[in-house]
């Protein structure tokens, strides 16, 4: 019998308990969490609520929203998932992660309030974030949707504005295998009479139809808001607001102006409730940071970290890699989960990779290094050959794989670490400890 932790237990003890206490790791549905949220009085918190869903771009969008609102002087709560290194990253208030003690306190409260209701790991995390934001008396909370939208735990909250960043193929086991099915699932974070921002330039018709039938105030990229730019600066144009002469966001990547324009559309739509001066936008976009998303570390060889783990994200990563300077060889450390479209993802990047370092990840859904290598051989066998043979090697974990890549790479080469958060996070943690 699994022993229930207490307030005297460590956060690690609690997380081990939460990973095992519920019969299913992913258990979609709102009944359980809504009942407990109502018991605890956090189902309709009074702060301004912005939900962010989508296949890719959610993390960047949340980070930009947080940075701009902090620069505007608001007290901001941010809930994101998954984490890269520490669970605490998921719950932030005013740019700082929640402490172990704060999270343990909320977990204990939830455990007492739930009674006979079994909650998943993600449901505990979501409730803990909401409780922490109420306790901290935040002005505004940004809530990242974990999976889909309709049945995701975050969707118990009726947000004041909802953003969908992009719709592409991912999590097909739960959301469906077409953009139309996935778009319909994601559109359920929209609410009647509330701003519904869609940054996907070509959204599935199901998303548009659902928003229309619901009576949401749909803001579509290219129709209700847009951006323009040259090499030095860019401008946002919305329904009734323009912001011009802005420096590019500090986040790297081809899609960041699209994400930034969705952020500014949301802030325009909420401007009766959130006053955000132009200077706050400038400061926020200049200061925003997000580890593990096209993150380029200083020094040689060049090290690029990116949690691209589906074909759409890999295609964007490939475009971003192409915009970097020339490197004689690119070494790729990769680890993914078996429920992803592994070969389609690898195929987007394979032409750019000279040496592969496959890592086995932790967790029951993780692909082994051998399985990853088999996928790579299939992909590179189906593509035009390089002048030199591509090498593929296997390792027990991402840190071992990275160490081998670093040993093999010359100073003027490039090392790419990509795939699951469980591949990028351990390497980032290892490098952080090495630096410190």
Image: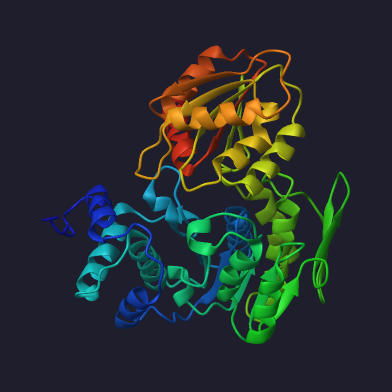
Give the farthest residue toward the left.
Answer: 1
Q: Quadrant of residue 167?
A: bottom right
Q: Is residue 116 above or below residue 144?
A: below
Residue 193 is situated, as x and y percent measured from the top left of the image, at 64, 87
Q: Considering the image in quadrants, where does the C terminus appear?
A: top left
Residue 425 is situated, as x and y percent measured from the top left of the image, at 46, 39
Q: As drawn, is 284 to the left or to the right of 78?
A: right
Q: Is residue 216 above or below residue 372?
A: below
Residue 390 is situated, as x and y percent measured from the top left of the image, at 62, 18
**Residue ID at (46%, 55%):** 81
Q: Considering the image in quadrants, where does the N terminus appear?
A: bottom left
Colour basis: rainbow
Give the farthest residue toward the right.
Answer: 230
Q: Observer-nearest residue: 168 or 332?
A: 168
Q: Is residue 149 above or below residue 334?
A: below
Q: Observer-nearest residue: 435 or 405?
A: 405
Residue 331: in sight, yes or no? yes
**Residue ID at (70%, 37%):** 318
Q: Is residue 313 above or below residue 45?
A: above
Q: Quadrant of residue 200?
A: bottom right
Residue 73: in sight, yes or no? no
Q: How many marks?
A: 0
Q: As drawn, is 309 to the left or to the right of 387?
A: left
Residue 271 is situated, as x and y percent measured from the top left of the image, at 69, 77
């Amino acid at each position: 019998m699994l022993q229930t932790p207490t307030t005297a237990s460590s956060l690690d003890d609690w997380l081990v308990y939460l990973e095992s206490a519920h019969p299913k790791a992913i258990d979609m549905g709102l009944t359980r969490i809504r009942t407990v949220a109502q018991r605890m009085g956090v189902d309709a918190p009074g702060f301004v609520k912005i939900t962010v869903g989508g296949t890719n771009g959610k993390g960047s969008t949340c980070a930009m929203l947080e940075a701009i609102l902090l620069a505007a002087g608001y007290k901001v709560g941010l809930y994101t998932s998954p984490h890269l290194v520490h669970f605490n990253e998921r719950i932030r208030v005013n740019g700082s992660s929640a402490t172990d003690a704060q999270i343990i306190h909320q977990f204990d409260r939830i455990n007492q309030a739930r009674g006979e209701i079994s909650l998943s790991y993600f449901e505990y995390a979501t409730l803990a974030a909401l409780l922490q934001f109420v306790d901290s008396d935040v002005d505004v909370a940004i809530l990242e949707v974990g999976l889909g939208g309709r049945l995701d735990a975050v969707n118990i909250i009726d947000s004041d504005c909802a953003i969908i960043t992009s719709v592409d193929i991912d999590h097909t086991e739960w959301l469906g295998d077409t953009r139309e099915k996935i778009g319909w699932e994601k559109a359920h974070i929209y609410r009647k009479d509330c701003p519904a921002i869609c940054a996907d330039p070509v959204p599935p018709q199901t998303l548009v139809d659902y928003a229309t039938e619901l009576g949401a105030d749909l803001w579509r990229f290219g129709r209700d808001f847009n951006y323009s730019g040259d090499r030095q600066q860019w401008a946002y144009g919305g329904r009734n607001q323009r912001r011009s002469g802005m420096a590019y966001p500090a986040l790297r990547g081809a899609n960041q102006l699209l994400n930034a324009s969705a952020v500014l559309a949301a802030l325009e739509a909420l401007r009766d409730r959130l006053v955000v001066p132009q200077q706050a936008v400038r400061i926020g976009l200049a200061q925003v940071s997000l580890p593990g998303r096209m993150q380029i570390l200083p020094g040689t060889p060049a090290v690029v970290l990116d949690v691209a783990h589906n074909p759409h994200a890999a295609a964007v990563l490939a475009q971003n890699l192409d915009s970097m300077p020339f490197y004689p060889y690119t070494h790729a450390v990769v680890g993914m989960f078996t429920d992803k479209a592994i070969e389609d993802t690898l195929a987007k990047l394979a032409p750019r990779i000279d040496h592969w370092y496959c890592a086995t990840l932790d967790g029951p859904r993780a692909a082994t290094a051998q399985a990853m290598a088999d996928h790579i051989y299939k992909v590179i066998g189906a593509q035009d050959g390089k002048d030199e043979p591509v090498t593929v090697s296997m390792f027990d974990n991402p840190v071992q794989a990275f160490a081998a890549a670093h040993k093999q790479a010359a100073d003027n080469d490039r090392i790419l670490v990509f795939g699951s958060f469980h591949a990028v996070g351990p390497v980032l943690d290892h490098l952080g400890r090495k630096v410190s």
